[in-house]
């Protein structure tokens, strides 16, 4: 097959230097290189992906890190393959579009919809060595158990609450409350998450509306009115944790709605912030692992899940990010002082009881809520 | 050169302005390399300590490498395809009398005057109606669409610029169309082809809006960077990579300029280009 | 040769070879077909979908004007559209005004190494758009470069807050990000001006100002028009810059379009909004070109 125009790169440079390479040959090589480039993705659709025998974990951007897989890596030599989504909607849409993974990472509020999509399969609990250590309160969330099968392994849980600057936000002796984000003294210094999936819920808590009642028209209007009232005070609506943290660090914001990881990050950078425990209760969510019905590698899928609910992973999540973990033993691995610093306690059920659990909502309400919140953010 | 004496006499304020403007263009870009050595994960003044930690993290960041590779692949394929389409198109519109040529060129140039978001949205709708899953192929397709007008615009002057008598001579000497194209046309337009490849590659490599709409599970580099902006601890390595890209593209650009100068001198001596 | 021409195939072949338009079309067709398939088909679907409505996860494909009525009725859409046009307009004017003297300088006052200057001006645009926008966050931020240095110099007591997360921030950032698109076309049109015209004007006793207004400016207008459109059209549809530096009052129409495809999940509404945006942009651009042409003709 070797034709006379097939020239190795080394040969090419030599011949270019000596001037024996004809223009014609050079052009043919250029054309060849062009075809090779065009063909590259065809020939190697995932040339850079990790070896195909590892399971694939489809998760939130930011959770796609090997540190969460110490037991898995020990067993299989390397981390699973990662694919990331930016929101659970996006994740589900991609799966419904035919994207196949082994394990995915939705949160409890969307769980029933994920299960109803028919894309998941129940676990073989005997393959999950850590299952017995999972906090019982987290095992029976709506949607986790269906027709006697377990579809959801809770992994991380956390809260949406307020991070505020101890030195700049004066509570004046009052209790920490969601009202801090509605405090007119700090107009233009308040940051709020841009997604209704957090902010609408927090406003619902502040309005004193029970989550089971939040879909009524009256309560919808009540919450919308509160958010409109907050709009002029808000400097920033953003989904972007970096922006919120930077603004808190610089003092541009004195209080912001954040997730658990922000106060941890900020304290690590010696910014004097506090993670509020609002008297009305913080918004609490649980995310965890589900298994795709066509998981190409069910055994590895179980190993991924077992790794996610292991004590090693738990210790890392708690210590590095300040999130809660589903394995009750994980908390024993972290010192009392560190837990206090993170605003956590040895007894996670206490915290889970104090928080307000997100509940699944129907799709129609969700779009209505999202649409309304976009309007509010735009100032209407 | 008498005109210089009174029309183009030195103008001091304008001179100062020019340097000010260059500073305005450069300073923001130079902040990135500066902050890529900042010890804190927060980008704020004053910078207290410097570190090379982010560069180390960048070299270990697998997902970032994958995104970079995706962008390189998409950019390479899109620029080659767009340039090939551009060569066909440019040759057709410069060499043949085609009825309705102006409106045909307008159709091809349309992406230049359509906002990216509109094109991205429209392509997304089409793909979802056709049931095509989003992937790097769909991004590449979108990029070919926006790059082709640039390729045409770069190549048309090149085709116009050389004497078609050369092609005719080649045909008269018995060469077939293919060999005329290969041996006469292509060498003449080669600088244009290289320029088009470079331009298309750059456009694709940096394109965000269409890629944002059409990316599947494999992100291109800009999409990946955008997702990293959200995680404080992930941002500094991203900025480190950005700094390296700036540096590399400066080097590539200078190199291509040097090449171009060399090319101009060479072709000027050939008498092909004035 | 003549024998092959007797067959039908031969005749067709001969026709093909002889007819210039046919050969031209044949050569143009790959490009044209791909652009048609890639532009027109999606556009038709976009138009069709804008008349549909979204019901949770399904589309209701009966044609209706619901989306357009909503765009007209709800003030939010109107305000965001006008704001986007205003921001892009301001950015276009600022970019062209700032770039013109620069292009003029290189065209008329640089005599050696012009290429170096052009490269110098375009070099920053080879870096990532996203990171350039991000860089402006560092500069305009609460304790960013500007505030930190002004406070360090004692010119400011307290950081200027309007610098970041405001429409101003969007205009500044876009003005920087799109500079190359203004410099190059203006430079090219200035460079094309026949120097003897300027000389003639001088010989007729025109001063520098009169010469500029009478000769240079009208002749460089095509470059200015091209630059304005090259900047105005894409910036109206930008959503990265407003998302990163705009704050609540700097959000633009493209941000709203984008969320229709993501969070809000109302694709037909997103389609209708994109179309409404495109129609308005096209109308403004045509009006602008028409006015500018009239102005040039009048100038002559």
Image: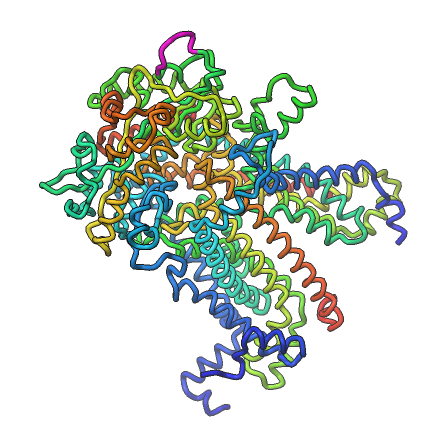
Q: Position of residue C44 (x, y in %)?
A: 37, 50
Report the residue that reaches farthest toward the top: A173
Q: Using the rendered view, name the quadrant where residue B14 is placed.
A: top right
Magenta stretch: dominant SS?
Answer: loop
Task: Please say which color scheme the image uses.
Answer: rainbow
Q: Say if the magenta span includes residue B115.
A: no
Report the residue that reaches farthest toward the bottom: C3
Q: Residue at x 58, y 56 (%)?
A: B199
Q: Nearer the viewer, residue A319 or B63?
A: A319
Image quarter (top left, top right, bottom left or bottom right) of the N terminus of chain B: bottom right
Query: Could you tell whether C213 is left or right of A170 in the image?
Result: right
Q: Which residue is drawn at 14% across and 38% down?
A: A145
Image quarter (top left, top right, bottom left or bottom right) of the C terminus of chain B: bottom right
Q: Give the range drawn in magenta.
A: A171-177
Q: Where is residue A364 in the image (x, y as percent from the top left)?
A: 24, 32
Query: Could you tell whether C95 is left or right of C46 in the image?
Result: right
Report the residue that reaches farthest toward the left: A148
Q: Which residue is drawn at 25% across and 45% down?
A: A305
Determine if residue B209 is in view. Answer: no
Question: Taking C19 as reference, is B145 above or below it?
Answer: above
Q: Where is residue A285 in the image (x, y as percent from the top left)?
A: 28, 30
Q: Nearer the viewer, residue C40 or A33?
A: A33
Query: Could you tell whether B124 is left or right of A306 in the image?
Result: right
Query: Could you tell whether B8 is left or right of C14 in the image?
Result: right
Q: Using the rendered view, name the quadrant where residue A374 is placed.
A: top left
Q: Which of B233 and C166 is in front in this view?
A: B233
Question: Taking A226 as reference, is A79 above or below it?
Answer: below
């Amino acid at each position: 097959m070797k034709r006379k125009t097939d020239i190795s790169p080394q040969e090419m440079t030599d011949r270019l230097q000596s001037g024996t390479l004809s223009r014609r040959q050079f052009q043919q090589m250029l054309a060849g290189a062009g075809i090779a480039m065009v063909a590259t993705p065809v020939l190697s659709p995932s040339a850079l992906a990790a070896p195909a025998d590892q399971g694939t974990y489809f998760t939130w951007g930011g959770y796609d890190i090997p540190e969460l897989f110490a037991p898995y890596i020990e067993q299989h030599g390397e981390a699973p393959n990662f694919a990331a989504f930016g929101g659970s909607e996006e994740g589900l849409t991609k799966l419904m579009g035919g994207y196949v993974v082994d394990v995915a990472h939705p949160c409890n509020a969307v769980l029933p919809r994920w299960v109803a999509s028919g894309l998941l399969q129940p676990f073989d609990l005997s393959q999950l060595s850590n299952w017995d250590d999972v906090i019982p309160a987290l095992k029976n969330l709506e949607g986790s158990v269906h027709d006697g099968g377990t579809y959801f392994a809770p992994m991380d849980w956390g809260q949406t609450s307020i991070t505020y600057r101890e030195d700049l936000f004066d509570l004046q002796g009052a209790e920490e409350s969601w009202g801090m984000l509605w405090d007119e003294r700090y107009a233009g210094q308040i940051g709020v998450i841009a997604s209704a999936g957090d902010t609408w819920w927090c406003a619902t808590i502040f309005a004193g509306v029970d989550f089971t009642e939040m879909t009524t028209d009256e309560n919808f209007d009540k919450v919308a009115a509160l958010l409109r009232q907050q709009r002029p005070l808000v400097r920033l609506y953003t989904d972007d944790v970096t922006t919120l943290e930077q603004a808190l660090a610089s003092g541009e914001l004195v209080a912001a709605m954040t997730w658990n990881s922000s106060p941890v990050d900020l304290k690590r950078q010696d910014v004097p912030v506090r993670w509020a425990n609002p008297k009305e209760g913080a918004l609490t969510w649980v995310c965890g692992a589900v298994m795709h019905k066509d998981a190409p590698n069910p055994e590895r899928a179980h190993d991924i899940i077992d790794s996610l609910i292991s004590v090693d992973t738990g210790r890392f999540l708690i210590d590095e990010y300040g999130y809660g973990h589903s394995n009750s033993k994980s908390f024993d691995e972290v010192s009392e002082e560190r837990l206090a610093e993170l605003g956590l306690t040895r007894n996670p059920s206490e915290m889970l009881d104090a928080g307000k659990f997100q509940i699944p909502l129907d799709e129609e309400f969700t779009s209505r809520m999202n649409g309304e919140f976009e309007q509010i953010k735009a100032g209407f | 050169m008498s005109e210089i004496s009174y029309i183009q006499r030195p103008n001091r304020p304008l001179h100062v302005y020019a340097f000010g403007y260059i500073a305005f263009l450069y300073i923001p870009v130079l902040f990135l390399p500066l902050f890529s050595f900042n010890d804190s994960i927060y980008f704020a003044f004053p910078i207290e300590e410097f570190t090379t930690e982010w560069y180390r993290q960048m070299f270990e960041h697998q997902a970032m490498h994958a995104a970079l590779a995706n962008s390189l692949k998409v950019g390479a394929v899109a620029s080659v395809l767009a340039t090939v389409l551009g060569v066909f198109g440019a040759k057709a519109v410069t060499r043949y009398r085609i009825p309705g040529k102006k409106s045909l060129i307008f159709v091809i140039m349309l992406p230049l005057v359509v906002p990216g978001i509109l094109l991205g949205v429209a392509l997304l709708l089409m793909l979802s109606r056709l049931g095509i899953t989003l992937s790097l192929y769909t991004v590449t397709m979108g990029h070919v669409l926006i790059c082709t007008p640039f390729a045409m615009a770069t190549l048309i002057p090149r085709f116009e610029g050389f004497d078609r008598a050369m092609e005719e001579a080649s045909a008269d000497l018995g060469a077939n169309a293919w060999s005329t194209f290969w041996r006469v046309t292509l060498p003449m337009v080669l600088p244009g082809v290289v320029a088009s490849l470079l331009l298309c590659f750059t456009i694709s490599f940096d394109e965000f809006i269409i890629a944002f709409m059409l990316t599947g599970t494999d992100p291109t580099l800009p999409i990946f960077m955008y997702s990293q902006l959200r995680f404080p601890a992930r941002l500094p390595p991203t900025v480190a990579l950005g700094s390296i890209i700036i540096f590399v593209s400066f080097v590539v650009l200078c190199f291509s300029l040097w090449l171009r100068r060399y090319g101009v001198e060479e072709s000027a001596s050939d008498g092909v280009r004035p | 040769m003549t024998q092959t021409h007797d067959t039908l195939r031969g005749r067709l072949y001969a026709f093909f070879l002889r007819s210039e338009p046919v050969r031209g079309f044949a050569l143009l067709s790959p490009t044209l077909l791909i652009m048609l398939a890639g532009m027109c088909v999606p556009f038709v679907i976009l138009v069709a979908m804008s008349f549909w409505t979204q019901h949770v996860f399904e589309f209701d494909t009966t044609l209706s004007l619901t989306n357009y009525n909503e765009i007209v009725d709800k003030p939010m859409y109107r305000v965001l559209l006008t704001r986007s046009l205003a921001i892009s307009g301001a950015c276009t004017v600022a970019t062209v005004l700032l770039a013109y003297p620069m292009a003029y300088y290189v065209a008329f006052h640089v005599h050696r190494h012009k290429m170096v200057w052009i490269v110098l001006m375009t070099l920053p645009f080879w870096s990532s758009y996203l990171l350039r926008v991000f860089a402006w966050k560092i500069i305009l931020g609460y304790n960013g470069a500007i505030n930190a240095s002004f406070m360090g110099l004692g010119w400011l007591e307290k950081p200027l807050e309007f610098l970041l997360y405001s429409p101003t921030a969007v205009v500044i950032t876009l003005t920087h990000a799109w500079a190359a698109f203004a410099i190059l076309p203006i430079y090219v049109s200035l460079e094309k001006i026949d120097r003897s015209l300027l000389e003639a004007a001088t010989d007729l006793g025109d001063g520098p100002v009169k010469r500029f207004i009478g000769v240079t400016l009208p002749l460089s207008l095509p470059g200015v028009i091209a630059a304005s459109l090259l900047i105005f059209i894409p910036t109206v549809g930008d959503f990265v810059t407003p998302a990163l530096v705009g704050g609540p009052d700097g959000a633009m129409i493209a941000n709203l379009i984008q969320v229709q495809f993501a969070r809000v999940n109302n694709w037909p509404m997103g389609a209708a909004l994109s179309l409404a945006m495109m129609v308005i942009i096209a109308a403004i651009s045509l009006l602008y070109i028409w006015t500018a042409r009239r102005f040039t003709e009048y100038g002559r």
